[in-house]
Amino acid sequence: MSDQVKYSEGKTLQSNRFSKSLWVVLLVFASTCALAQRRYEPPTAVERDVDTFVVKSDGSYVQTTEHVERVETPQGVEDAGAQIFYR
């Protein structure tokens, strides 16, 4: 009779370990799904992008480029903040 009790207790112990493992797996899966459902926010948005060409009668030209970006997220500040371009 004592053999059956030990076997029964062993089974219960295994079931509890399995149950805890299952809960951990489900919790990780639920967390991953929640992160995957977040809406994508682009770090920056282009507000204006204009190229202007002034062509003279001799064929020479002057090009002016205007590019304005709006920073939307903290990642955008890191990516595009304080950039000045000269040509």
Image: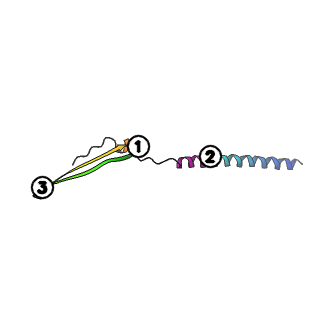
Q: Toward the viewer: 18 or 66? A: 66
Main SS of residues in magenta: helix
* Classed neighbour count for the residue bearing mark 3: other residues with Cα under 10 Å, few (<14), some (14–19), many (≥20): few
Residue where numbered disc 1 is placed: 75
Answer with mark 2 or mark 3, whichever residue precedes in sequence: 2
- Magenta-drawn segment: 29-41
Q: Which SS class for mark 2? A: helix
Q: Is residue 73 left or right of residue 5?
A: left
Q: Which SS class for mark 1? A: helix
Q: What residue is rendered at 85% in x and 47% in y?
A: 5
| Residue type highlighted by circle 1 | Gln
| Residue type highlighted by circle 3 | Lys
Relative image position of residue 68 (x, y in whole percent): 30, 45
Q: Is residue 69 left or right of residue 15?
A: left
Q: Which SS class for mark 3? A: loop
Residue where numbered disc 3 is placed: 56
Relative image position of residue 20 (x, y in whole percent): 69, 46
Q: Toward the viewer: 54 or 3? A: 54
* Classed neighbour count for the residue bearing mark 2: other residues with Cα under 10 Å, few (<14), some (14–19), many (≥20): few
Relative image position of residue 82 (x, y in whole percent): 31, 40
Extreme residue in the left direction = 58
CA distance for labels 1 and 2: 28 Å
Q: What residue is rendered at 34% in x and 41% in y?
A: 81
Q: What residue is rendered at 60% in x and 47% in y?
A: 30
Extreme residue in the right direction = 1
Q: What residue is rendered at 12% in x and 55% in y?
A: 56
Answer with mark 1 or mark 2, whichever residue precedes in sequence: 2
Relative image position of residue 80 (x, y in whole percent): 34, 44
Residue where numbered disc 2 is placed: 27
Looking at the image, is mark 1 or mark 3 nearer the viewer? Answer: 3
